C-alpha cells in the first residue's frame, strides 16, 4: 500500500462543475503539498499546508491532520484546469526534501 | 530570467554515452533537488543538496552522479545508463528547512535511453 493515496485516479468533468480530488496518507507529516503537472511535464506548486484551509482564486485546499486527509477543490472548472494534480507529503521523520508523492489524479475538463 | 530552468528539455542517448543535465534557479534558494518521474509511477526523490552539500541520496545507482558547484546550479551527470532509466527528470529548489518550505520545480528533461 502506498503511503500517499489519491482518488480518483482519473476524473472527467464538464466546464463549470465543482471538482474535488482527495488525498489520504498513512504517515505523520509536517506539511502537505498540492502540485499541478501539465502535459509536457512542468510542475507548479499550488499549495503547501499543514493545517486548516487555503484558498487561491478558484482553488481551495483543506487538510484534516487527525484524519490524515486532504482535499483539493476547484470551483467553476475550466478546460485550462485539465492537468494531473499531485499530492505530496513531507514525512515528520524525513528530511526537508523527502517528499512522498501520490500517483496523481488526471483531470480533464470538457468545454 | 526567473524561476527554475532546466537544459536540455529533451535528450536521447545511447547506453554508452555520457551526458549531463543542468538545472539553474534564480530564486535565491539554498536547497536543490533532483527527482525522477517514470511512466505510471509517482515522482521519486533522487538527491538533495543544502548549501551545496549533499544531504540526501535516495539509494540512487552510481551511474547517476550529481554535482552542485554553487547554490544556484545543479547538475546530474549520466553515464552507462540503462533503457529503464528513461524518464522525466525534474529539478526543484527551495529554502532549506526547518520549517518545511515550498519547492519550485523546473520544466524537466525528458530522457530517452536507447
Image (cartoon, rainbow, N blue to C red):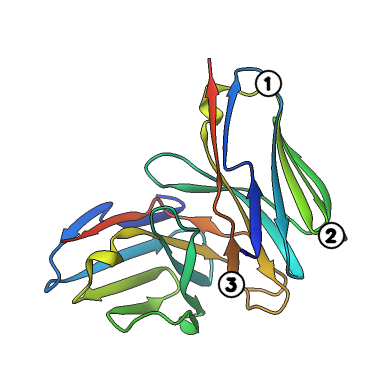
Q: Quadrant of residue B94?
A: bottom right
Q: Give the chain of mark 3.
A: A
C-alpha separation, residue under disc 3 versus residue under disc 1: 34 Å
Mark 3, residue position? A98
The image shows residue A97 at horizontal and vertical percentages of 57, 71
Q: Give the chain of mark 2.
A: A
Same chain assignment for discs 1 and 2: yes
C-alpha separation, residue under disc 3 versus residue under disc 2: 19 Å
Q: Give the chain of mark 1.
A: A
Same chain assignment for discs 3 and 2: yes
Q: Earlier in the sequence, mark 1 or mark 2?
A: 1
C-alpha separation, residue under disc 1 versus residue under disc 2: 27 Å
Same chain assignment for discs 3 and 1: yes
Mark 2, residue position? A65
Q: Earlier in the sequence, mark 3 or mark 2?
A: 2
Q: Is residue B71 visible?
A: yes
- Tag 1–tag 2 contact (CB < 8 Å): no
Q: Residue drawn at (37%, 54%), measured in percent from left and top? A: B108
Q: Residues within 10 Å of mark 3 (few under 14, many from 20)?
A: many
Relative side of B39 to A84, left or right: left
Placement of A45 over or under B33, stated as above or below:
above
> Depth check: B24 or A44 in front?
A44
- Circle 2 — which element? loop
Q: Residue drawn at (35%, 78%), measured in percent from left and top? A: B66
Mark 1, residue position? A17
Residue projecting furthest to the right: A66
> Depth check: B27 or A41 in front?
A41
Q: Residue drawn at (48%, 78%), measured in percent from left and top? A: B49
Placement of A81 over or under B48, stated as above or below:
above
Placement of A55 over or under B19, stated as above or below:
above
Q: Is residue B101 visible?
A: no
Amino acid at each position: 500500500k502506498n503511503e500517499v493515496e489519491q482518488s480518483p485516479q482519473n476524473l472527467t468533468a464538464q466546464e463549470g462543475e465543482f471538482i474535488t480530488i482527495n488525498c489520504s496518507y498513512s504517515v505523520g507529516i509536517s506539511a502537505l503539498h498540492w502540485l499541478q503537472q501539465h502535459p509536457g511535464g512542468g510542475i507548479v506548486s499550488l499549495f503547501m499546508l499543514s493545517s486548516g484551509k487555503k484558498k487561491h482564486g478558484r482553488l481551495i485546499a483543506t487538510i484534516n491532520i487527525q484524519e490524515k486527509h486532504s482535499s483539493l477543490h476547484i470551483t467553476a472548472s475550466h478546460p485550462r484546469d485539465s492537468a494531473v494534480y499531485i499530492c505530496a507529503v513531507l514525512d515528520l521523520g524525513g528530511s526537508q526534501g523527502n517528499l512522498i508523492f501520490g500517483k496523481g489524479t488526471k483531470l480533464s475538463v470538457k468545454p | 530570467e526567473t524561476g527554475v530552468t532546466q537544459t536540455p528539455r529533451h535528450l536521447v542517448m545511447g547506453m554508452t554515452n555520457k551526458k549531463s543535465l543542468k538545472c539553474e534557479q534564480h530564486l535565491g534558494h539554498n536547497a536543490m533537488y533532483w527527482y525522477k518521474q517514470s511512466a505510471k509511477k509517482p515522482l521519486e526523490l533522487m538527491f538533495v543538496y543544502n548549501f551545496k552539500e549533499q544531504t540526501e541520496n535516495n539509494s540512487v545507482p552510481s551511474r547517476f552522479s550529481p554535482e552542485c558547484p554553487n547554490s544556484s546550479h545543479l547538475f546530474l551527470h549520466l553515464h552507462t545508463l540503462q533503457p529503464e532509466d528513461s524518464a522525466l527528470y525534474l529539478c526543484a529548489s527551495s529554502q532549506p528547512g526547518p520549517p518545511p518550505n515550498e519547492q519550485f520545480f523546473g520544466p524537466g528533461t525528458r530522457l530517452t535511453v536507447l
